[in-house]
Amino acid sequence: MQNSFIEIKEDSHFPIQNLPYSAFQTHNGEIHLCSAIGDYLIDLFVLDEAGLFDGPKLEGQFAFQDSSLNYFMSLGKEAWKEARATLQDLFSADNEILQQDELLRDRVLIPMNGVEMVLPMEIGDYTDFYSSEQHAFNVGTMFRGPENALMPNWKHLPVGYHGRASSIILSGKDVRRPKGQILPQGSDTPVYDSCKLLDFELEMGFVTGVGNELGSRIDVNDAEEHIFGLVLVNDWSARDIQKWEYQPLGPFLAKNFATSISPWIVSLEALEPFRRECKKQDPEPLEYLQQSERSTFDIDLEVAIQSDKMTEPRIVCRSNYQNLYWTMSQQLAHQTVTGCNVRPGDLYASGTISGPTEDSYGSMLELAWKGTKPVSLGNGEERTFLQDGDRVIMRGYAQGEGYRVGFGEVNTKILPSH
Ligand code: MN
């Protein structure tokens, strides 16, 4: 096991095995790319300027002197590997460079507490899939009954829609309750009102690195070469707006007001020890979706709610990334099967990750079963959907032996509509 000269607690999300990517605002207002170790940010701009990314793929590229990761992402897997190996080496216990150079070390390591994180990439396009069978079954059961819960296409393709990239925001930024058209119960004319059925969706997303040319396809067995890393995603949903608008073209304004992500992008390399085989798919999908080996990652996920009357958040859902029927590779092969091009920095979210038990459902719609089973917050309050002032906190990490590879959290407060 690799050790760092930085002290790292066992429950830290950021041991030397992780080294995720993000960006932050420096004390003089610049945007610098960063990684994290223990309770510190690693200022990658300073390391790059000091000439420490000196391997064959990164030397002279100045990839970490940009204010976004897009260029670094476009360099491909060998460059990503080299950057990670360089960081692991610089922060390992037997490397003297930073341990002996106090001046450099103080410029590179910045206490995380109180620093403002910034969206680390320009997101050109955003797709949201619908890839948890339990979620699709639950929602289908509520609206069509258990016999017709899954649509006929569901086991043949990873269902998805093209979402809104401009309103993707980081953890810590408040979300205002949206307004829109809603059809009141029993009425046949809509009203303009604030959303009453505001919901979260527990998801994860992958960010693409190297893209593909318009007109070409990404092969399902090469897809991971194009995947830079994963983030936690809260796909905010206005259920009453959704119900009135969604037919026949699918989600629109019910989904476009905000999508919150974790500041940290965790690389596939850091997640490698947590790779797990997937169950066989039945029926077997069409050939372009057949992977020689289907695998996923063991990442524990949870959602907590904290109302403005509570001092501690209450966990309302525990799930796992393995509760997905379609893999990232299948999603990316499907996204590009028509010749659609993906670009560095695009975001592809998984769909709500619901598990098989009632306490593993990834949305209030399912946890409170369409408003019929209120969820207790433990202090006498209960919820069917979210209220103003509520804070929704999503967390995720993969548990190793004596260490955790974590995503930090997506922590968002709901403001009243205006
Ligand atoms: Mn969603």
Image (tube, helix red, strand yellow):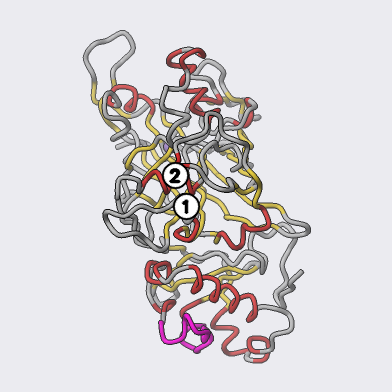
Q: Give the magenta part as a residue range.
A: 46-61
Q: Are marks 1 and 2 in contact (CB under 8 Å)?
A: yes
Picture quadrant of residue 2: bottom right
Residue 331 marker: 2
Asked whether the viewer can see residue 311, the reply is: no
x and y, in percent, of residue 109 in the image: 58, 77
SS for tag 1? Answer: strand
Asked whether the viewer can see residue 167, the reply is: yes
x and y, in percent, of residue 222 in the image: 47, 56
**Residue that sits furthest to the top in the current view:** 186
Q: Is residue 127 left or right of residue 138?
A: left
Q: Amino acid at mark 1?
A: Phe
Using a 10 Å C-alpha cutoff, classify the residue at mark 2 as few (fewer than 14 neighbours), some (14 to 19) or many (20 or more): many
Q: Is residue 343 left or right of residue 280?
A: left
Q: Amino acid at mark 2?
A: Gln
SS for tag 2? Answer: helix
